[in-house]
Amino acid sequence: MLSDGQIVAIKKSQLVDEHKSKHLVEQFINEVVILLQINHRNVVKLLGCCLETEVPLLVYEFVPNGTLFHHIHDDNNGPEFPFSWKMRLKIAADVAGALAYLHSATSLSIFHRDIKSSNILLDEKYAAKVSDFGISKSLAIGQTHLTTIANGTFGYIDPEYFQSSQLTEKSDVYSFGVVLVELLTGLVPIIPSTSEEDAKGLASHFLSSMNEDNLDSILDDRVAAEGEREGVVAVAKLARRCLNLNGRKRPNMKEVAMELENVRIGQMGSTVDTRLQQDSKTLSKDDYDYGWTSTTDFGTTATSSCDAHPLMFDTI
């Protein structure tokens, strides 16, 4: 708790050997540099940092409802927390909008590199907050990719990136596709087996089921019971496109965000907001409002009509 009563979260690296400590410090510095460029309601806010300690500390807004991974996979959530299909769809749309912003609306395109359900936090209203930018990369103007050692989390990492070391915006699209499949199926990214050699990735299991026209066999029970059939199938088909082994055939995150918003509108039925209906029909993919503020440099932002808030950055 800060002196003004605000509850914050502190990120602190563990003390390890000198080589690993240097690497962690570099990640912390990278996270600060990246987050200074970002102002979006679905990205966790960096409030400050403390460098006058043995290891650096990063100070974030406190996001009270844990990780998306916990809510998908923890059986102890109980009946008091109905992790409904509509809630899953809203979270997916939130994250897609944030990634579209990172790729397209910041002064320099930013690739997250480690999108996974444990890096998506949920606030008091269960809105999604993308977190952990320690290995993220920003691109110079005109760049479309980076050549870098493949980094990420097993089960989420783009196979094309892993093989070629070519990091593109489509690498985040693949990882997001895995998160979509988690939301649809309730299964973990690496499906365990009796032997370690037989363990398989959720992505390949999902693609096999889709190719065999057997989606129902792997849908989460709650999704199958609550989801309007057409919407569930649309999200599954979108996930399949995101997981295409050929990155060029994957949609970009603007397209993903637009499609998910359209599915949400369709699921809302007669209660849908009239403005959203008009937006989905009249706005192009280039001018759709995903809830961001565009950042032109470190000190200047042009704020959209969304409920984004200015980024505060102070040394604590």
Image (cartoon, rainbow, N blue to C red):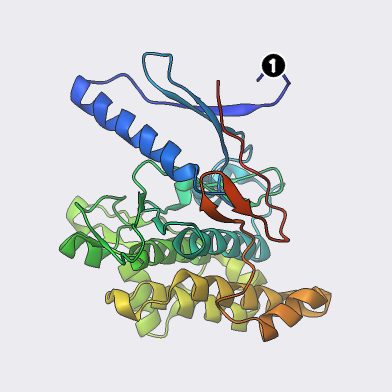
- In the picture of the structure, the residue carrying the numbered disc 1 is 3
Choose between 136 and 313: the one closer to the eye. Answer: 313
Q: Quadrant of residue 55?
A: top left
Residue at 54% of width from left, 58% of height from top? 98
Q: Residue shown at 71%/48% (left/top)?
A: 125
The residue sitting at 50% across, 42% down in the picture is: 36
Going by the image, does 30 lie left or right of 181?
A: left
Q: Position of residue 265 (x, y in %)?
A: 70, 76
Name the spot of residue 16 as percent of width and height, x first: 26, 21
Q: Is residue 248 left or right of residue 34?
A: left
Quarter the N terminus occupies: top right
* Between 197 and 17, the one nearer to me in the picture: 17
* Front position in the image: 313 or 240: 313
- In the displayed structure, 130 sits above or below 53; it is below
Q: Is residue 261 left or right of residue 178?
A: right
Would residue 102 be found to the left or right of residue 211 on screen? right
Quarter of the view holding residue 190:
bottom left
Residue 172, image x, y percentages:
38, 61
| Residue 161 seen in the current view | yes
Camera-nearest residue between 158 and 302: 302
Please state which amino acid type lies under the numbered disc 1.
Ser
Q: Quadrant of residue 210?
A: bottom left
Q: Position of residue 128 (x, y in %)?
A: 60, 52
From where the camera sits, is residue 216 visible? no
User: Does 263 appear above or below 167?
Assistant: below
For the residue labelled by badge 1, is the local secondary structure a helix, a strand or a loop? loop
154, above or below 36, in the image:
below
Identify the residue at image location x=68%, y=51%: 308
Q: Quadrant of the C terminus?
A: top right
Residue 309 vertical position relative to residue 279 in the rendered view, above or below: above
